[in-house]
Amino acid sequence: MSYHDHIYPSYKEETIKILNEIEKFQFLEDPKIEPIIIALRKGPLTVRELENQYNELVNERIDEMDLSQEEKNVLLEKLVRKSKTLYKYLNELEKQGFVIPAGKRIVENQTASETLYGRTAKLFLHQGGQEIWSETEGMDSALKLLSGTLGLLNKSKKPSVSTLKNMLIKIDKKIDVDIKSLVTDYSEDFSKLAENLSYYELKLMFTGLKMLLLMKNYDEFEQELHDSRIL
């Protein structure tokens, strides 16, 4: 069957798209959603092509699990998806700004065409961290526990919760600025290095990077940590 793909002139895939909301990044980690994003790494696809690649990715992931063949078969039957369901996922991805119609597939001797869907960026990154210290359920109790623990560690008066929160936000902001500069300055190189990582693996990598950048910037915070009696 002969066809040609017409990509819209307006379609543009950014190199890196930085997400400010952790919820959006968590949405990409959803095991129902991630195979679509992975399948679209090589370029725009029709829903029928997505269905094949989506289920291949699911099959590969299940095949790597330490399960009996019977258990794998049951799980595969549960997780494979048809085009109708993928349309729903694509609509949600479009609403979230991750996927857009990128063009049309024109099939010879057919009047109807198929929509090609593409990613809005080669790589999606979560930028932020300080929002974790906002008023969320359990955070106040966690900070009180941290304050008490530091009091024991320092064998002195424990730091106030507000002092701790402000310091943690300040550190997060500094590290996030450094990370943003890194991925922006080397966007093409970084996107190639990370193109085959899952979003869970990407999150682990950034956890390590943040720890190393914190060590690099320790001198900058050392005096303030001492003056505020946090450490």
Image (spheres, grey):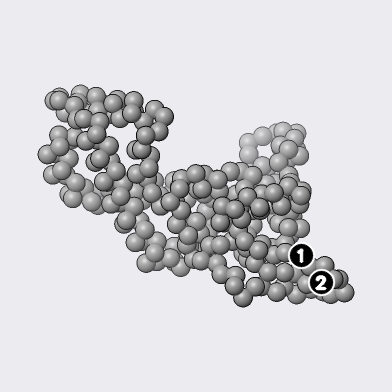
- Vertical arrangement, residue 197 with respect to residue 228, above or below: below
Distance of label 1 from label 2 (alpha carbons): 8 Å
Relative to residue 61, is residue 22 drawn left or right?
left
In the rendered image, the vertical position of residue 221 relative to residue 163, given as above or below: below
Residue 121, given in percent of the width and then of the height, sits at 53, 62
In the image, is 162 to the left or to the right of 229?
right
Graded by Cα atoms within 10 Å as few (under 14), some (14 to 19) or many (20 or more), the crowding at tag 1 reads: some
Q: Is residue 69 shown to the viewer in this render?
A: no
Residue visible at 62% across and 61% down in the picture: 100
Residue at mark 1:
114
Are discs 1 and 2 less than 8 Å apart at CB? Answer: yes
User: Looking at the figure, which quarter contains the C terminus?
Assistant: top left
Q: Residue 178, position in %: x, y?
A: 31, 57
Q: Secondary structure at mark 2?
A: strand
Residue at 24 percent across and 34 percent down: it is 162
Q: Amino acid at mark 2?
A: Val
Q: Quadrant of the N terminus?
A: bottom right
Identity of the residue drawn at 52% across and 53% down: 197
Q: Position of residue 25 (x, y in %)?
A: 50, 48
Q: Secondary structure at mark 1?
A: strand
The amino acid type of the residue labelled 1 equals: Glu
Residue 27: x and y in percent read 55, 45
Q: As drawn, is 98 to the left or to the right of 58?
A: left
- For marks 1 and 2, the one nearer the N-term is 2
Q: Nearer the viewer, residue 8 or 127?
A: 8
Q: 61 or 67, which is in the foreground?
A: 61
- Residue shown at the point (76%, 39%) measured from the top left: 77
The residue where tag 2 is placed is: 107
Q: Judge from the rendering whether residue 18 lies leftward or rightward of residue 133; answer left or right.
A: right
